[in-house]
Image (cartoon, helix red, strand yellow):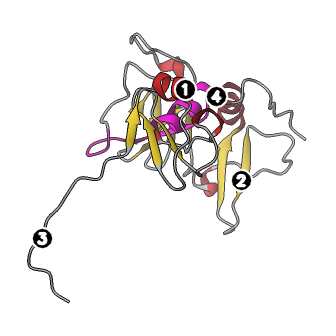
Amino acid sequence: MSCNNKQYSAIQLRRGLNSEFELSNIVLASGEPGFATDEYIFKIGDGVTPWNNLDSLATLSYVDNLLSVNDAMIFKGTLGIGGTISSLPSIYETGWTYKVTTADTYAGNVCEVGDLVIAIADRPSGGGNDADWVVAQTNLDLQTLPAIADPCDTEYILIQNSSRDTRVISISNLAQAISVIDGGGVIYNGC
């Protein structure tokens, strides 16, 4: 069946301010979407449950806000020539993480392609400083490091993923990043 008369229309969701939804406590029809435009809350009705009792579906801004409130690592993009950014920002939040795409010196550290640069402090007003960043070196050549005879007596930790790829990370960098991101709950004490 061919249709030569094409008409396109916009599909609009039930939308409004969250305070309006909460005040009316509307019951959305089964499968009917509702969107609170001021707080980016998205809910889908079941025909029975009032708005205030419906679970919200996660939106990108909701997830970003949730992660930043909990100081989780948030991938912000790539760092280097042709990357998302070419130099570290002066305004940032704890957990912002960039993957290095161009070898250079970032946050006072010599970085290679593949390294992660992670913010461990908030700078909402700018004026960032190198001490606010930690570098996780993800691409160290194992042959350039001294042999690790006793894993309890070293500055590095070997990490192996399920594909048996091995990486070496400085314990001090790893411990510092984990401590800041999880609020100090995880502490590496060696063996």
> Total number of numbered labels?
4
Q: Which residue is mark 4?
A: 70
The residue range painted magenta reads: 61-84
Q: Tell me which amino acid carries mark 3.
A: Lys
Q: Tell me which amino acid carries mark 1.
A: Glu
Structural distance between the alpha carbons of marks 4 and 3: 48 Å
Q: Can residue 126 be seen?
A: yes
Q: Which residue is mark 2?
A: 159
Q: Residue at x 12, y 70 (%)?
A: 6
For discs 2 and 3, the disc positioned in front in the rendered view: 3
Q: Earlier in the sequence, mark 2 or mark 3?
A: 3
**Is disc 1 surrounded by few (<14), some (14 to 19) or many (20+) residues within 10 Å?**
some
Quarter of the picture holding the N terminus: bottom left
- Percent x, y of residue 108: 45, 25
Structural distance between the alpha carbons of marks 1 and 3: 39 Å
Is 81 magenta? The answer is yes
Foreground residue among 38 and 29: 29
- Find the residue positioned furthest to the right: 191
Left of 148 or right of it: where is 90? left
| Circle on res. 6 | 3
SS state under label 3:
loop
Structural distance between the alpha carbons of marks 2 and 3: 57 Å
Q: Are marks 2 and 3 in contact (CB under 8 Å)?
A: no
Q: Are marks 1 and 3 in contact (CB under 8 Å)?
A: no
Structural distance between the alpha carbons of marks 1 and 4: 26 Å
| Circle on res. 22 | 1
